[in-house]
Image (tube, rainbow, N blue to C red):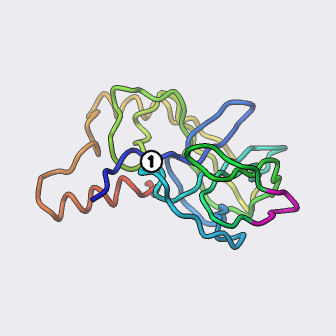
Amino acid sequence: MFLITAQIPDEFTINGEKFSLVGLKGQGLFTPEDFGIRPHFTCTACWRGYVMEYNFINNKLVLTGMRVNVNEPTKINSVEPQKGDSLFKFHYNNLNLKTHFTGSVLLAKDFIQSMYVHMGFQRPMAFKTVVEIHVENGNIISLKDLSKQMEEKRKQNPYEGAQPQSNTQNNIERWIKQTFSLDYD
């Protein structure tokens, strides 16, 4: 049996500031499979075996990097993989590939450590700063600051989603699935 821990999220940079992906609606974000790479996990903090790195450049959503666990890496966009670190075998830098993503991403920073959940991805309300960015075919359409709404959610019920509703197998399985999902309303 494996111990499951909080997951390392994809990273987005907006005007030089790093955000974590905490919610996703839509299609078209890159995965390693898009490049013929089949990642594998090497630690419980990243069951997916990869972390994507995006940047907003000239109002476009661009894949700039990828950290990945793979045995035989390939070139991506003429970029050779670099040896990684203890968590990821390889890193790709300066990929500079515009996405064709259409939908919304919920991004967060300034994590509130007391709200840490030891399972899946962290809840959006566990961050002081939360923004929702609408994207169409890789072009940024709008940005909305949801920080005040998340603060209100914390005031109403800071424990929402932090644990299963009961210890029944059904509720535990549903909660685990929810913590590993980035879907949001």
The residue under label 1 is 45
Q: Is residue 33 magenta?
A: no
Image spot of residue 65 (x, y percent): 73, 50
Quarter in which the C terminus is drawn: bottom left
Instruction: Give the dominant element type of the magenta stretch: helix, strand or loop.
Output: loop
Q: Callout 1: 10 Å neighbours few (<14), some, many (20+)?
A: many
Question: What kind of residue is marked 1?
Answer: Ala
Q: Secondary structure at mark 1?
A: loop
User: At 40% across and 36% down in the image, what residue appears?
Assistant: 125
Which of 136/20 is in front?
20
User: At 42% across and 58% down in the image, what residue appears?
Assistant: 181
Image spot of residue 32 (x, y percent): 65, 64
Q: Give the residue at the far bottom of this rendering.
A: 36
Image spot of residue 60 (x, y percent): 79, 50
| Left or right of 77 on screen, residue 87 | left
* Residue 141 visible within the image: no
* Residue 147 visible within the image: yes
Q: How many labels sit on residues? A: 1
Which of 5/138 is in front?
5
| Left or right of 92 on screen, residue 37 | left
Q: Is residue 78 magenta?
A: yes
**Magenta residues (range):** 74-80
- As displayed, is residue 28 above or below residue 145? below
- As displayed, is residue 47 above or below residue 155? below
User: At 45% across and 51% down in the image, what residue appears?
Assistant: 43
Quarter in which the N terminus is drawn: bottom left
Q: Give the residue at the far right of this rendering.
A: 78
User: At 58% across and 63% down in the image, what residue appears?
Assistant: 26
Image spot of residue 163 (x, y percent): 23, 45
